[in-house]
Amino acid sequence: MGIKARGSLVLLIFALLIGSFGVYVAAFARQRPPSVAVMVGADGAPTLVLQTVGTLGFGPKPDWPSFLVQRSDGSWEQTTVFNLPAYSTVRVKVLEYDTQTGLRNNFFGQPQGLVDDAITVDSKTFTGSDIVTTFNPDLVAHTFTVPGLDVSVPFVGVTNDAPNQCSVAPCDESNAHRTIEFDIKTGAPGTFRWQCFVPCAPGGFLYGNGGPMQTVGFMDGFVNVV
Amino acid sequence: MSSDGDPDRAEISHGRRIFFIWLIVAGIVTPLVALFVTPYLPPGDASVQANNQQGINAILLVLVVPIILGCVVYVFYSFVLFRDRGDGRPDSPVLRGNRRVTVWWIIGTCLIVAFVVPYGTWQWMGPGVGSGSAQGPKPIATPPGETLEVQVIGQQWQFTYRYPSFGGIETQELVIPEDQYVELHVTSLDVNHSFWAVGLALKADAVNGADNVVFVSATRAGEFKIRCAELCGLWHGEMYQNDARVVPEAEFQTWIQQQTELNEGLLAYLPPYAHIYYPQPFYRGD
């Protein structure tokens, strides 16, 4: 093989390697959990139904906590990307199956940005200053915090010794859980990131968020207001 | 090379010519830059510190313009007079060593540094009160009179603020009064962040277990932007606030009153105000 042919072959292999790497990076960058649209409630109101679990129980990270969203057919999707209608009041129902971890900053134990400052936990409704006096930040399992919408809601977890805890998602309501309900208002269309402010990953992560706490699809995501 | 056959004389002539051209150009351009460009230099004049930095930037620009013009004049002069005209003349001989140029270069550089260092130090210690830079837990450039203490808490991925003068309440947005010195104590609850109030020309690292003090006096009411300037994880790029506010004193009092009411129940759960915080062990991962 002549020197020109060898040179061309090396260049071709090099180009193929670079191209393959580029395709891999592009595919990785475009990877995102599926987005789920809110359901329509019995009274026609848009309703977002979530569940939080302490251990997902399947997939490559079975020991990670995660959020799941209910589709309109009643099935559960492990995702953290939701589509909410613009300029609407959206009902949010959270089935909280995880245990209490506690907040790194107790400030996020205060619900903020809710319609009428009202939140219902296990059928008990709290309003106004009730909220802040009620939620002990040490008992919080997760938060749903959307800085762009000025919304932050702590979810009180089930007690560590609660019977019949769920270890594989999706959990059903026979498992130990708390039911948290509140309404939020959306404004103009846009994409807003959200996150959980509890250091909820296995292993502690006291001094920084790791694992599920910085992985979209588990404890971070996007609210698409459309 | 000389066209009259006397290289030494020609060299002196070119040098003088370049010097006089530079003198004229610098004499015209430098005042124009000082008059029409320096007022628009960043970071503006929204705070005493921003104004101070702008003044320092203006001095540095006015110092550097003649130097840049000297280089530009020299290069253009050479392009015009010594370009290859295609007449086959060889390159000039390589010149090595010129004591006079070396000495003047060293003297000039030393004079500039001898001016800039004490001037900058005086500005930092005096009128700039730290010039918007953080000074650690025991600041040495401090403002006269009383200050309003506000704590900046960095956490993945949001800044929150505590006001110890008002019971240690915590808020999501930063609001400060105008024409009053604010003493910001910057810390972090987790990884390293950097609190950057862009328009106010403040930047201070937020480090877990460290108290980093920076002073600011905002000169006019309005909104300003806050950014995290230290790569801190997945949502680093989202760790910002575009509507932090400087407000008149009366408006500040109204706002702080509202926040105090909002904090009424929360205060019981907030840790006592301190300059640093360490997360307590939690249930998971103990």
Image (cartoon, coloured by chain):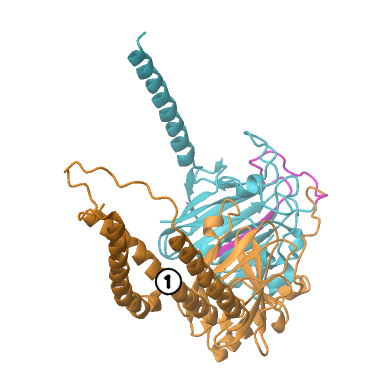
Chain colours: A cyan, B orange
Of A53 and B119, nearer the camera is: B119
Magenta stretch, residue numbers:
A160-184
Protein chain holding label 1: B
Q: In this figure, what is the number of numbered marks? A: 1
Left or right: where does residue A8 sit relative to residue A76? left
In the rendered image, the residue lying farthest to the top is A1
* A199 in the magenta segment: no
Left or right: where A226 falls relative to B32: right
Q: Is residue A43 above or below residue B167?
A: above
Give x and y (percent) for residue A14: 42, 24
Residue at x 78% of width, y 49% of height: B284
Q: Which residue is mark 1?
A: B61
Q: Is residue B85 above or below residue B6?
A: above
Task: Choose top left, top right, bottom left or bottom right for residue B192.
Answer: bottom right
**Residue B78, image quadrant:** bottom left
Q: Residue at x 54, y 78 (%)?
A: B49
Q: Determine the main secondary structure of the stretch shown in magenta.
A: loop
Amino acid bearing label 1:
Leu
Q: Position of residue A147 (x, y in %)?
A: 55, 63
B35 or B54, which is in the foreground? B35
> Taking B26 as reference, is A77 above or below it?
above
Q: Could you say which is closer to the camera, residue A150 or residue B114?
A: B114
Instruction: Name the residue at 20% across, 56% down.
Output: B4
Q: Is residue B43 visible?
A: no
Q: Give the percent coordinates (x, y) of residue A196.
A: 63, 55
On whether residue A170 falls in the magenta region, the answer is: yes
Mark 1 packing: few (<14 Cα in 10 Å), some, or many (20+)? some
